[in-house]
Amino acid sequence: MSAEPAARETAEPSKDLPRVPQLTVVETPQKKKRGGRFLLMLALPVVLAVGGGYLWLTGGRYASTDNAYLEQDRVTITADQSGRIVEVAVNENDHVQKGDLLFRIDPEPYKLALRQAEAAVAVAKLQVEQLRSNYQQALAEQQSAEDSLAYRQKTFQRQKDLLDRGVTSNADFDTAQNNLRLAEQVVAQAREKVAGALTALGGDPNIQTDQHPTVLQAKVAEETAALALKETSVFAPDDGVVSQTDRLRVGQYVTNPAMAPTALLSLVETATTYVAANFKETDLTHMKVGQSATVTFDTYPDRPFAAHVESIDAGTGSAFSLLPAQNASGNWVKVVQRVPVRLRLDGPVDFSTLRTGLSATVEVDTGYKRTLPGFGHAVAANSEAPAEAPTTH
């Protein structure tokens, strides 16, 4: 037997072993790999440029901040008159309308004071009528004195003529002369009395009784007493929510604020509700009064409120602080300043669901639209910016 057939028999696989399929390896040409990489390197900058341009064109229109809070004016309610509280008409956190009764002070002493003032007005009117009567009487007395003076003047002249002719005596002449002097004095006194009566009538003998200064003064006192009586009932000055009513008790004695002001309760006015948002100074470039905005409170994240920019403060928050920062000496770190912006809620709003101090997120639509030339300038500015920005100066 030859060696060659034996070698073939050993090279043939055993019929008992399973047949294993042979895998075919296909090699990718080097040129295809290089072409794909080239396309990727070419497309990636284009995609980035297009995406950046889109973000640039669509961005910059809206200015937003979450540094915003709901603000409502708070009014401290005090009593304008002194007295003991006899009625409390509200409880803690009650919603009240303008003109609703809050509490009442004992009105009885003020009713008595008003009646006394009304009586004083009546007395003043009677006094004016008496002054008018005195004036008329003074006029009559003046007329009588002037008539008597005219008679005494005639008598004196007659006695003087008789004395010149030697018909009468010196005694009769002296008597006539003395009577004339007395008559002149009476006339002078009567005229002074008329002037005094006229002055008491305010210089106008035909003055209306209600226009006399005495009556006017009494009426002012009457109106003051009526106002004091009215002020014993304290009403809500505006719509809002009352708070801190625990300081208000029936039987409590309150004093006039002019003597010792006492805060009895507080009223959070809902009519003055606004949102105070502190925007970065870089967000104010295109922001103007009247622009529309959207306000979302953290308490109601699914209920956006429409609003508009009502005002922009004249300075940053730090500029109006009690102790403004002084950057004239020492190291200085540049910090982006914030400017308070006030926004007013639009449309019918249920203020009963809002509470003063709530946190909010504000987004203002400035209406500003960027352009492609501006995008090129921004890219150029960023590329020319220094690698390391100074932090202190």
Image (spheres, rainbow, N blue to C red):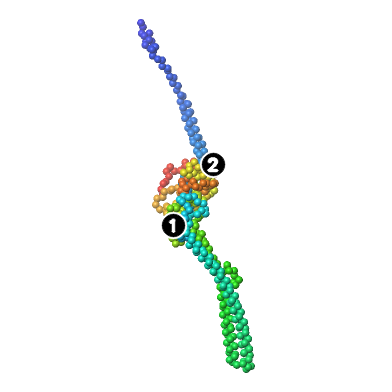
The picture places residue 110, in percent across and down from the top left corner, at 49, 62
Tell which of 122 and 335 is nearer to you: 122
Residue 137, placed above or below residue 292? below
| Closer-to-camera residue (41/74) | 74
Residue furthest top as drawn: 1
User: Measuring 58% from the left and 73% from the top, which residue is drawn there?
Assistant: 132
Q: How many marks?
A: 2
Front in this rendered view, residue 273 or 255: 255
Cβ atoms at labels 1 and 2 below 8 Å apart: no
Q: Quadrant of the N terminus?
A: top left
Compared with 36, 187 (above or below) is below
Q: Nearer the viewer, residue 258 or 88?
A: 88
Q: Residues within 10 Å of mark 1 (few under 14, many from 20)?
A: some
Q: Residue at x 59, y 85 (%)?
A: 180
Residue 344 on image: x %, y %: 52, 48
Within-10-Å neighbours for mark 2: few <14, some 14–19, many 20+: few
Establish if 199 lies above or below 381.
Answer: below
Could you tell me which secondary element the residue under label 1 belongs to? loop
Q: What amino acid does circle 1 point to?
A: Gly
Q: CA distance from mark 1 to mark 2?
A: 72 Å
Answer with mark 1 or mark 2, whichever residue precedes in sequence.
1
Q: Which residue is mark 2?
A: 371
Image location (x, y in percent) of residue 269: 49, 51
Give percent across and percent down for residue 163: 62, 92
Q: Residue at x 38, y 12 (%)?
A: 16
Question: Which residue is rendered at x = 62% and y = 83% of the image?
Answer: 150
Which residue is label 1 attached to? 251
Task: Assign a secondary structure to mark 2.
Answer: loop
Residue 202 visible to an observer of this rendering? no
User: In the image, what residue type sits under mark 2?
Assistant: Thr
Q: Is residue 247 visible?
A: yes
Can you tell which mark lies on residue 197?
Answer: none
